[in-house]
Image (cartoon, rainbow, N blue to C red):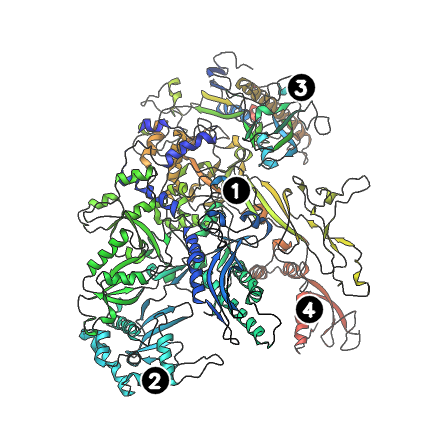
């Protein structure tokens, strides 16, 4: 052990250049040298970087978007391919194909065919949208001819960065640098009007699946299914009411007895109904029997009668012009299309649907008999995640339908005209509406309002501005999942940590407060599936020995040992050998014959085999363990991985690793460590975890030794890590963001984790390694305040830059006048006047100049006659005389800023766009907020001279002193271990690891400390800097990674004596930004009243706020003015008095409501 | 000063090792307070030269002006003859002059395709007839510390004004990087309570300085009259001053400050006797540097003046 450590001195060689540093790092990164022996138990974690290489952290977004532009768009076109005219039966237009970003002529095989004409960074700077044209191929009639037109642009589609339609797809770092893009930027967001927008992952209850719930108090059981098709979305319920079972649907006015529905669906025999619902089980039969009574009472025996019954109760919303249907037709229509809409009925074959309803009924019966058979809504397996691609596709289909109907209306209008001069070309009118698609997409993404007409869906807050506070905050945003639940409701269920979340969703990363538990984050190794074809899987099932449900005898359907096979929730067949069936199916998946993301699992309670191919399921890769309890991944495979011969997909292909979704995962027995495999008590282990630390997400992965911390501390750190100031991206100096915080000297943490390396946090860090002494000092450290070393601050500790953007547009007005810039004004000595001293001759702030409060950085001038229209007056053609008024942009702030960058460009609508970036460099000051990586935040309480600080016998003094009271109640043991590991690393010249459930061993670290002449506990003997005497107590002393948070005193400090007042109430304004007053609130007022300080009260509430002198008439009690009472027409009784303006306002408002408040004045003494 | 003379009672120094930027010695026969005062003065109050004012003509590098200015300030400059320079605030000149500052210039432009490194050695000093103000260079290549990197067509044109100052104002003026300080390695005085689980001897590693003192006799009774006498000091400088200079100058500074106190104290006795009827206090009268910490008056006039 000893010589191994001495071999590599990395950190000690501080001056070593990057070039020398890189390969050394790499060696550590790979974990081992190529010659080292491979140990499967330890090195299987190498699968994780391999996974991230192919899947990445934001891969789910990219996959989803790619699926949308490549596959889903074509499906949408196919579903809406024809546009016909009501006027001319000859006319048709048919969409043949659709493409995004490339024309059909350019070969798509080559990557060169991308037609995004702007680089993403230009879009960011110029406030444009990063988009690509959408091309369609159409076939239509012109006169008698059929014309095929290729590459017709129907609009522009915003492009997700790094998707396969993006310029940045598959290019190397050098090219990235050329495009001003950071190679570490994850992508997965859109740029709309210059702002980066993320479509958050939306969590929903799964569609087209039966969910059974019970209310035990009311004795209600209900099975519901949300059917979702391209056209509509509807929910069907099977519920119990007084122990009888009914079917409920929104479009049926009352609940229909289940027997009637089943009869309407063609199962007329009561025996068959009983067989389909209850099978042979006498308990179920007893429970269900009552339902036949009701149908019999209503005298409904045949399908015809049942359909009439249903048809009578259908709520019809008919479009104008549609023919009226008879009751029978209504009934057929309802059964065929409305109820359980996701099962399509062809040729009036209702049997499949009848079986589905029977299944729902059976599930209700099962729950009535045994209340434990309910489903859990919060179970992650019952959730589906909706990603950018799916949301975009919903939006696009809506817009495309609108586009087509507009187009159709337009053609009809033209075709209606009896005589046309020329032959009608439909293409000419198609282009009119192309803006609708572009605008619709842009608007939805930039506002976040998803309003879909056909689903009557109105969802706000779907998109968010990508937070660029730090690299981690951007990354954390890409993995965020928002839930549809209301935030205000007080329910614990959806907020609670679900056991099924393990490995799929991060257990630590959730906000505190109202969104707690509703906003989640993906774990490190999760993947979200996209839709897969259902039909081939169905055929495969029949080949594997599944008996087709349409051919199965009703009597034997629920026979014992007979398992139903459900494909995406729909019963497609049965099998008597579920184990064999599932085994065969899995083998096919493991050999790559079918998609790796199709899941299959057995549910023995329901005697069911479920197969899922739908999109939005959360899944993760696991190592397969064979029947002899041996991991399939062997040393030789890992060796291949290390030599770059194999990628992650090869492991999939060879059946060594597979993806499991939550449902299948819960049907497996997963070993966490390889050593668990040899445990003889568990003989049926099916899988082995790749790495246990993947239960955490990217943000929680930054915490060293999180498994030693109290769990809320990790959650706090997840929130704070996003506020830490650090490096944002390699292109950070090229960015012009509204607000950008950058650290001057960020350092990678001494104690890293494997996650840190995987997400490249070590390349874009946000914090510094501070030497911390855990002791009490000076009394300015109570309540978590920190003591900072002045010398450290002088040398650059915690120093940061704040860059703020200011945008100025030069407008053009309808009368041909426009805003201009005018140069600086000079005084008699030809020197610029003081407010203009930072301006250049062009009227723009010069780069590098200092701006004090009140100085001008852009001297904009607005024409004085901008309001005049050109049409006014006779001299309309004359150019209006140019006269301008200065409306300069002033710098406002307590501290001066410097001009960092000035950008001039032209935005979309030909207006000049000026962006001025102002910079401040700040050193830490009293009140600035800092935090370690363990949810331990604190503000700087005092900055102390280095010579006054304690020091050890080597003369090392701390950068930060932290009060020990921070530890006992917080129980952040991880922070203590971080200190010891960090100290060992410093002494040894290595970077140590604090990976969750692993990391450098505390005992090893202590050994290093002892070898270097330190106490093993990390405690040192310190001397007082003031007296030189050594401190009585030992001090816990060593490096801890500290983050500087964005909350700084300079942005918050505020005081006011006199200042602006609100117009209406004449009270002081509110808030720092308006230079507002400090409110003496109700409770403070109560205190003053209780104390009896009436003069103080008067001063605070009136004199210092909105004192107003009024003329009160003591006769009528109303207010007059100018010493005159208007109601008494006299000045006899008018008295001047001071009241709050707000009170005067109240009186006047009351008067306006016909209430007369009268003031009666009397003598005080 | 009696330090040099190895008398029984007077202070004595034993130099154990000495290098160009580093010295390790034992300070004997002084009080703990004296030893610590010397340590503090060495760290904070020995004047050196450092870049204080930066005039930026051209900066097209990726780093912001303040960033580079900060880096320049931290570059150690040779300050051996710092006494020739006066503090800028005491100087009669308007802003700065040759008597209170040293001017350095940095002009660099990258014309090559590869990145160009700008080092402290690229700082050009306006000739002032001595080594005062030369950047300290200690690496084998003779480059000094790295200031900035330039890409093709990037340029730096900077004038720096170095001024005299002390580390109390800013750490860049500190001549020391660390001052090691230890006394009583055996903890005979029981100033500290070692934390241990089983045994102090096994769990707390021995200091190297234990060899310089006799191991305590475990049987011997605790001597509550004993005082710390031997101080193991280790000075490491950043190169602006030699360790010897740092030590000597710190003593000078200390002496000067103590003299100030002594004068004030004497004045105090005069004044307080004069102003019995609510007279003046001397607090803050001096106007210059008021020491933040009161060292206690007893050192005032007696043995050190």
Q: Relative to the observer, which residue lies in front, A954 or A474?
A: A474
Are dots 2 and 4 on a single chain?
Answer: yes
Q: Is residue B44 left or right of residue A1130?
A: left
Q: Is residue A1087 above or below residue B21?
A: below
Residue A309 disc label: 2
Return the residue at label 4: A1144
Distance CA(mark 3)–CA(mark 1): 44 Å
Per the image, label 4 sits on a secondary structure element best described as helix
| Residues marked 1 and 4 touching at CB (< 8 Å) | no
**What x and y, as percent, mark residue A1129?**
79, 77
Can the viewer see residue B184 in this picture? yes
Sequence-first tag of 2 and 4: 2
Crowd class of label 4 (few under 14; some 14 to 19; many from 20; radius 10 Å): some
Q: Nearer the viewer, mark 2 or mark 3?
A: 2
Instruction: Pinpoint the chain carrying mark 3.
Output: B
Q: Relative to the observer, which residue lies in front, A204 or B32?
A: A204
Return the residue at label 1: A941
Can the viewer see residue B204 in this picture? no
Distance CA(mark 2)–CA(mark 4): 68 Å
Q: Is residue A43 above or below residue A858?
A: above
| Residues marked 4 and 3 touching at CB (< 8 Å) | no
Per the image, label 1 sits on a secondary structure element best described as strand
Crowd class of label 1 (few under 14; some 14 to 19; many from 20; radius 10 Å): many
């Amino acid at each position: 052990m000893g010589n191994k450590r001495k071999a590599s001195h990395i950190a000690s060689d501080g001056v070593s250049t990057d070039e020398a540093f890189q390969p050394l790092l790499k060696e550590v990164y790979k974990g081992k040298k190529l010659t080292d022996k491979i140990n499967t138990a330890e090195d299987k974690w190498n699968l994780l970087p391999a996974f991230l290489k192919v899947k990445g952290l934001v891969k789910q977004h990219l996959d989803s978007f790619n699926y949308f532009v490549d596959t889903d768009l074509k499906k949408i076109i196919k579903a809406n391919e024809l546009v016909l005219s009501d006027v001319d039966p000859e006319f048709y237009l048919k969409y043949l194909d659709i493409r995004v970003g490339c024309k059909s002529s350019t070969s798509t095989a080559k990557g060169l065919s991308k037609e995004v004409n702007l680089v993403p960074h230009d879009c960011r700077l110029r406030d444009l949208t990063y988009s690509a044209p959408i091309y369609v191929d159409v076939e239509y009639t012109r006169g008698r001819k059929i014309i095929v037109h290729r590459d017709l642009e129907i609009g522009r589609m915003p492009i997700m960065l790094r998707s396969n339609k993006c310029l940045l797809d598959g290019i190397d770092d050098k090219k990235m640098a050329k495009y001003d893009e950071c190679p570490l930027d994850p992508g997965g967001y859109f740029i709309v009007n210059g702002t980066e927008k993320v479509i958050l992952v939306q969590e929903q209850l799964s569609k087209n699946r039966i969910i059974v719930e019970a209310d035990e108090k009311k004795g209600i059981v209900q099975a519901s299914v949300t059917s979702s098709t391209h056209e509509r979305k509807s929910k069907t319920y099977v519920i119990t009411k007084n122990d009888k079972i009914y079917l409920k649907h929104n479009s049926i006015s009352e609940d229909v007895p289940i027997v009637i529905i089943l009869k309407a669906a063609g199962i007329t025999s009561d025996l068959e109904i009983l067989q389909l619902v209850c099978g042979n089980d006498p308990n179920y039969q007893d429970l269900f029997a009552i339902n036949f009574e009701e149908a019999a009472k209503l005298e409904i025996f045949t399908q015809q009668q049942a359909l009439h019954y249903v048809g009578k109760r259908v709520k019809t919303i008919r479009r104008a012009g549609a023919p009226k249907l008879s009751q029978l037709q209504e009934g057929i229509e309802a059964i065929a299309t409305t109820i359980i809409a996701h099962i399509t009925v062809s040729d009036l074959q209702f049997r499949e649907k009848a079986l589905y309803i029977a299944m729902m009924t059976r599930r209700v019966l099962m729950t009535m008999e045994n209340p434990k058979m309910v489903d859990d809504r919060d179970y992650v397996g019952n959730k589906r995640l909706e990603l950018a691609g799916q949301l975009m596709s919903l939006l696009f289909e809506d817009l495309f339908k609108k586009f087509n109907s507009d187009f159709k209306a337009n053609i009809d209008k033209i075709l209606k005209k009896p005589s046309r001069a020329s032959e009608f070309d439909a293409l000419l009118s198609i282009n009119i509406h192309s803006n609708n698609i572009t605008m619709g997409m842009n608007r939805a993404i930039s506002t976040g309002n998803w309003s879909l007409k056909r689903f009557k869906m109105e969802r706000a807050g779907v998109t968010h501005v990508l937070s660029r506070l730090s690299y981690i905050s951007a990354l954390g945003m890409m993995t965020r999942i928002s839930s549809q639940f209301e935030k205000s409701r007080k329910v614990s269920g959806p907020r609670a940590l679900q056991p099924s979340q393990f490995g799929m969703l991060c257990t630590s990363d959730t906000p505190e407060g109202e969104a707690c538990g509703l906003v989640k984050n993906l774990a490190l190794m999760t993947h979200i599936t996209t839709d897969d074809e259902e039909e081939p899987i169905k055929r495969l099932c029949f080949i594997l020995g599944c008996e087709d449900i349409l051919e199965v005898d009703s009597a034997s359907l629920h026979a014992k040992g007979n398992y139903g096979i459900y494909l995406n929730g729909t019963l497609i067949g049965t099998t008597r050998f579920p184990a064999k069936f599932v085994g065969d199916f899995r083998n096919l998946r493991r050999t790559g014959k079918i998609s790796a993301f199709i899941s299959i699992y057995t549910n023995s309670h329901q005697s069911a085999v479920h197969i899922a191919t739908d999109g939005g399921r959360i899944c993760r890769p696991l190592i397969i363990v064979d029947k002899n309890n041996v991991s399939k991944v062997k040393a030789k495979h890992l060796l291949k991985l290390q030599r770059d011969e194999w990628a992650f997909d090869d492991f999939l292909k060879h059946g060594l690793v597979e993806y499991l979704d939550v449902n299948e995962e819960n049907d497996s027995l997963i070993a966490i460590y390889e050593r668990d495999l040899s445990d003889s008590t568990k003989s049926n282990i099916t899988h082995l975890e790749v790495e246990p630390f993947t239960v955490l997400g990217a943000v929680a992965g930054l915490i060293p030794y999180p498994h030693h911390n109290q769990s809320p501390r990790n959650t706090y750190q997840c929130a704070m890590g996003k506020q830490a100031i650090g490096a944002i991206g390699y292109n950070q100096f090229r960015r012009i963001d509204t607000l950008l915080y950058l650290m001057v000297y960020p350092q990678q943490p001494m104690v890293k984790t494997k996650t840190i390396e995987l997400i490249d946090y070590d390349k874009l860090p946000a914090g510094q390694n501070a030497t911390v002494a855990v002791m009490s000092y000076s009394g300015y450290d109570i309540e978590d305040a920190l003591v900072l070393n002045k010398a450290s601050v002088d040398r650059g500790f915690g120093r940061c830059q704040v860059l703020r953007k200011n945008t100025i547009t030069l407008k053009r007005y309808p009368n041909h006048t426009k805003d201009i810039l005018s140069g600086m004004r000079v005084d008699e000595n030809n020197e610029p006047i003081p407010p203009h001293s930072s301006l250049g001759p062009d009227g723009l702030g010069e780069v590098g100049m200092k701006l004090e409060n009140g100085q001008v950085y852009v001297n904009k001038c607005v024409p004085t006659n901008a309001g005049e229209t050109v049409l006014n007056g006779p001299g309309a053609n004359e150019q209006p005389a140019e006269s301008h008024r200065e409306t300069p942009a002033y710098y406002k702030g307590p501290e001066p800023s410097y001009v960092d960058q000035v950008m001039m460009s032209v935005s979309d609508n030909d207006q000049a766009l000026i962006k001025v970036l102002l910079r401040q460099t700040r050193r830490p000051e009293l009140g600035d907020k800092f935090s370690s990586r363990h949810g331990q935040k604190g503000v700087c309480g005092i900055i102390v001279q280095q010579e006054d600080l304690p020091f050890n016998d080597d003369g090392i003094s701390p950068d930060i002193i932290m009060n020990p009271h921070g530890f006992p109640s917080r129980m952040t043991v991880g922070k203590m271990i971080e200190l010891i590991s960090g100290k060992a690393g410093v002494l040894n010249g290595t970077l140590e690891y604090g990976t969750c459930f692993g990391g450098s061993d505390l005992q090893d670290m202590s050994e290093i400390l002892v070898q270097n002449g330190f106490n093993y506990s990390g405690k040192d003997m310190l001397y007082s800097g003031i007296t030189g005497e050594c401190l009585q107590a030992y001090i816990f002393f060593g490096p801890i990674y500290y983050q500087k948070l964005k909350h700084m005193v300079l942005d918050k400090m505020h005081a006011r004596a006199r200042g602006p007042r609100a117009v209406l109430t004449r009270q002081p304004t509110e808030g720092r930004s308006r230079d507002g007053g400090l409110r003496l609130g109700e409770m403070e007022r109560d205190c003053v009243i209780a104390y009896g300080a009436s003069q103080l009260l008067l001063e605070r509430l009136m004199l210092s706020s909105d004192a107003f002198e009024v003329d009160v008439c003591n006769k009528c009690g109303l207010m007059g003015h100018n010493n005159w009472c208007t109601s008494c027409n006299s000045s006899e009784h008018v008295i001047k008095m001071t009241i709050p303006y707000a009170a005067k306002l109240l009186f006047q408002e009351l008067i306006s409501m016909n209430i007369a408040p009268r003031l009666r004045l009397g003598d005080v003494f | 000063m009696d330090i040099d003379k190895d008398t029984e009672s007077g202070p004595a120094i034993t130099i154990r090792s000495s290098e160009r930027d580093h010295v390790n010695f034992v300070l004997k026969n002084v009080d703990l307070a004296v030893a610590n005062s010397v340590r503090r003065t060495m760290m904070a109050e020995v004047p050196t030269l450092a870049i204080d004012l930066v005039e930026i003509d051209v900066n097209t590098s990726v780093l912001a002006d303040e960033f580079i200015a900060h880096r320049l300030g931290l570059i150690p400059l040779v300050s051996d003859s710092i006494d020739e320079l006066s503090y800028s605030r005491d100087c009669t000149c308007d802003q700065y002059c040759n008597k209170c500052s040293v001017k350095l210039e940095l002009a660099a432009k990258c014309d090559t395709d590869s990145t160009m490194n700008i080092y402290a050695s690229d700082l050009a000093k306006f000739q002032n007839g001595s080594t005062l103000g030369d950047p300290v260079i200690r690496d084998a290549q003779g480059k000094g510390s790295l200031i900035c990197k330039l890409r093709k067509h990037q340029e730096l044109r900077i004038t720096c004004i170095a001024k005299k100052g002390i580390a109390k104002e800013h750490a860049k003026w500190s001549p020391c990087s660390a001052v090691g300080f230890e006394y009583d390695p055996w903890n005979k005085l029981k100033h500290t309570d070692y934390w241990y689980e089983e045994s102090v001897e096994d769990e707390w590693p021995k200091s190297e300085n234990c060899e310089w003192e006799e191991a305590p006799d475990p049987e011997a009774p605790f001597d509550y009259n004993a005082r710390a006498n031997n101080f193991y000091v280790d000075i490491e400088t950043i190169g602006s001053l030699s360790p010897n200079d740092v030590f000597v100058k710190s003593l000078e500074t200390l002496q000067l400050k103590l003299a100030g106190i002594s004068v004030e104290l004497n004045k105090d006795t005069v004044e307080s006797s004069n102003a019995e009827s609510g007279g003046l206090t001397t607090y803050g009268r001096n106007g210059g540097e008021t020491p933040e910490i009161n060292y206690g008056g007893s050192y005032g006039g007696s043995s050190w003046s």
